[in-house]
Image: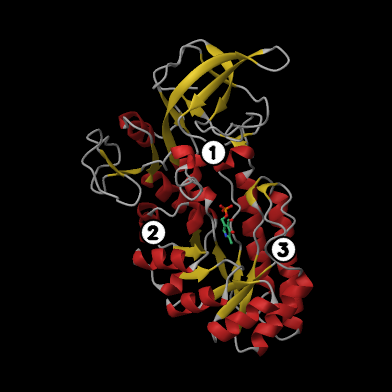
Amino acid sequence: MSTDDIPARLARALAAADSDRLVYDLAGIRDQYRRLLAELPGVRVRFAVKACPVDEVLDCLAREGAGFDAASPAEIEQGLARGVPPERIHYGNTVKSDAAVAEAYRLGVRTFATDSIQDVAALAAHAPGSRVFCRLSTTGQGALWGLSRKFGCSAEDAVRVLETARAAGLVPAGLSVHVGSQQMTAEAWRDAFDTLADVLTALAARGIVPDLVNLGGGLPALGYLDRHGQRLDPPLDKMFAVVREGMERLRETSPVPLDFVMEPGRHLVADHGAVRAHVYRLTTRRQPGGATARWLYLSCGKFNGLYEMDQLCHRLVFPGRTGAPLVPAVVAGPTCDSDDTYGADGHRTPVPEDLASGDPVWILSAGAYATSYMTQGFNGFRPLDCATTDTAPDAPADTTADTLAYAVPGTWVAAGPEGTD
Ligand SMILES: Cc1ncc(COP(=O)(O)O)c(C=O)c1O
């Protein structure tokens, strides 16, 4: 693969890196955010913090006007520390303890997801008077990660939950859905809107008129390969069209103006983050059964950022090796754990045959969930350092004067211009 389809800014930052790191392209994330708002006018974004709890990324989105979907008091605190007011942060996790609810309320959050009458009772006790939205379950069909069982309730339960909330002095503010992460079909969105419309009608019959519809996450990244190495090609334009139609339909039937919120995670950051890793070794070994197989071991794998490799493959770039003869190899991470292997069993990736230990490799579309999924040192492999690259705010649009910042986890520092790290 050539580096042609990597944004130049990201490619420059990766090329300038002389040690392993995860690089986020803030200008790319900003553009992606603006594209999303242009596609879905009127939607307010609450970025799902878990997808990339990196201060610089949160700052970048907050400056654009995004708020945060937080799943714990610690994520709320992180959002507040970025200067985002509590009104732009909601507690989007239906799973929470009494103490967590009370802490979120103390921090100023007044909007909470819920999906059970037990959780509603806790909210009434520890977050009195708050606005609650009830998460409806979805089938998760068509998504790489379905999210269909742990969260959400049936349409009938949602009516009961919001009636209970009203009776307990909470504000039954709305409904939410999540169609499943990396959803690959527009039909899942259509189904979600059908359910939302039905439940809004049922609520209206009981005198409950929500003003909030939270469409959750699920919008896909475009740069992944499936477990067998085939490009994943989600019909994004069609999805946006279905969401626009669905929003219009709900607006037409609602007696009050509806506030539409979305909680994208992956869609905003996945394709704008990449790992600069390096080659451990390309080996040839006879496998059980007698066939010879090549294995390419890399410095980054499942336990230092690429946890999602069970479900997908990342595109790899071997800088400086374009044009070299390619050989098929199973790719794996550095740990002494057989789960730390890229893609489906037996999946082989074409790799340059002359790779040497220490050669750089770029792992693309690694910007979502990677920082959250890093272990603290499985087998002694420490979490990846992080870096950001951005267009200098005062630079003309066509300049190459990007800036690069990098640091070890937890101690972010701004470095000088590109290439000086
Ligand atoms: C409540 C909620 N909102 C949003 C997201 C973000 O989802 P995605 O990264 O698929 O956009 C998640 C992810 O699990 C979630 O649980």
First along the sequence among labels 2 and 3: 2
Q: Secondary structure at mark 1?
A: helix
Side of 331 relative to 76 (left or right): right
Amino acid found under the numbered disc labelled 1: Lys
Q: Residue at x 63, y 64 (%)?
A: 247
Amino acid found under the numbered disc labelled 2: Glu
Within 10 Å of disc 2 (Cα), the crowding (few <14, some 14-19, many 20+) is few
Q: Quarter containing ligand 1?
A: bottom right
Q: Nearer the viewer, residue 3 or 240?
A: 3
The residue identified by callout 1 is 302
First along the sequence among labels 1 and 2: 2
The residue identified by callout 3 is 137
Query: Can residue 305 be seen by looking at this rendering?
Result: no
Amino acid found under the numbered disc labelled 3: Ser
Question: Are discs 1 and 2 less than 8 Å apart at CB?
Answer: no
Q: Secondary structure at mark 2?
A: loop
For residue 93, above or below residue 348: below
